[in-house]
Amino acid sequence: MSGFELSDLAPALPELMLLVTACAVLLWDVYLGARDRLASYRLGQVGIVVTILLVIFGFPSAPELTFNDTFVLDPMAAVLKLVLLVVGYFCFFYARDYLRARDALRGEYFMLGLFSLLGMMVLVSAHSLLTIYLGLELLSLSLYALVALKRDSAEASEAAMKYFVLGALASGMLLYGISMLYGATGSLDLSEVAAAARQGNGDLVLTLGLVFVLVGIAFKLGAAPFHMWIPDVYEGAETPVTMFVGTAPKLAAFAMLMRLLGEGLSAMHADWSQMLVILAVLSMAIGNIVAIAQANLKRMLAYSTIAHMGYMFLGVIPGTTESFAAAMFYVIVYAVMSLGAFAMIIVLSRAGFEADRLEDFKGLTRKSPWCAFLVLILMLSMAGVPPFLGFWAKWAVLQEVIAAGYVWLAVLAMLLAVVGLFYYLRVVKLVYFDEPPDPIALDAAGDVKVMVSANSLVILVLGLFPGLLLGWCLAAFG
């Protein structure tokens, strides 16, 4: 083991900053939280902003390894960390007034969110099978507690229990797969695992390890048939928690997919690409078809998430640099769209009323034409209608799948996208053409409406100039 110097901490400065912030929020809430409940929120937001600046100023031109080659800072990690932190900032911002209106503005949400973000960032920069598992468990344990944050809610407790039990099972399978990879290659380092896989060492054990690892990843992404937890968790958790669970962790799970399959097991592309085809078809079919039957908007978005993860897999299947960039583009676009969709539920909600049913959006244009327009942007983008950003995300992954020779898969994906168009347009129809059953109250603060507007308009602007974001993703894998 080589000697450790202080300069070796430089690539991990953003993670250290986030760790310090999370600990500070925890201590503040324990000792001084009763004096100023908003202080935990402000402290968390300041910490995230400083961490964003550290990531920007430390943006690498080439991969930098530290902690005895278990941690890597490369362009892909830096781009994903920036998006993760921005998503975390927005989630905290949207949660502030929602929690305050329900007398639940305490430091637990922000502290657990910060520790979860820390786990995601460690996962994104993992260069060892051990680091992957440590980052994943820090992320998962924080999310289990977040889902159960509303302690007097039977639905939240049930959702957290299901998430915990199924998550523990998936983590066990992932760990079993990692142990097989270690047994077959004799190393935890992803570079050495890749070298051993190229030489064909322990083919049968490697293949079994790959299967178990892929099950763990599919669960974290919420891909079918490992999606059972998603609808219950999305519906049972409080909306700010659902927003957080449904956005940032998907970016981290994508990074885990890239580290394990794109780097560590790239030599086994012929094996894992066929497995991903099955996961993609099941996810797109189950997600789009079952979403049609949902009356609860959060459950509908849960099945929508399952379908979106299927489309993201389309970009990973070809196994090329361009296809990985397309998949990264897709998962970033998904996170931005999902963030806006849950934010609209928060805007329409108020104390004692959750606007999480489809009928709650009836006649929204009568009360607020601007909010109705934002819902229109979000739904059409999620459906993949041009010129919105979601269209270009689907276009990017379908283009790569066709280039790899999977024409039948692209045709099936487009047919299922047409099925998905129905339930997104149903929301638009409710907003614009139905009469509101009760007067719609828009109690959200002005700054929240501004942030939701910015969130939605980014989707429209980047839809007109998709090359900006796609160029970042290509550079991350360049």
Image (spheres, rainbow, N blue to C red):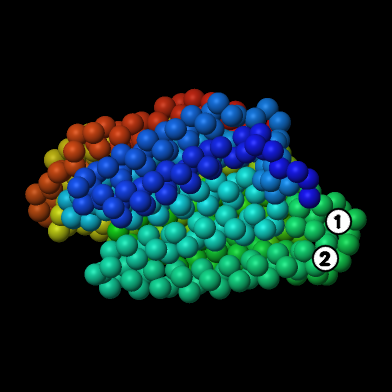
Residue behind mark 2 = 184
- Quadrant of the rendered structure where residue 155 is? bottom left
x%, y% of residue 393? 53, 39
Residue drawn at the location 80% of the way across and 58% of the way down: 187
Residue drawn at the location 48% of the way across and 46% of the way down: 19
Residue 4 vs 168, above or below: the answer is: above
Q: Which mark is residue 185?
A: none
Q: CA distance from mark 1 to mark 2?
A: 8 Å
- Amino acid type indicated by mark 2: Ala
The tag earlier along the polypeptide, 1 or 2, is: 2
Instruction: Kindly indicate whether the residue at mark 2 contacts the one at mark 1 (C-beta within 8 angstroms).
Output: yes
Q: Nearer the viewer, residue 364 or 212?
A: 212
Residue behind mark 1 = 196
Q: Residue furthest left?
A: 439
x%, y% of residue 325? 63, 38
Q: Is residue 262 left or right of residue 390?
A: right
x%, y% of residue 395? 56, 39
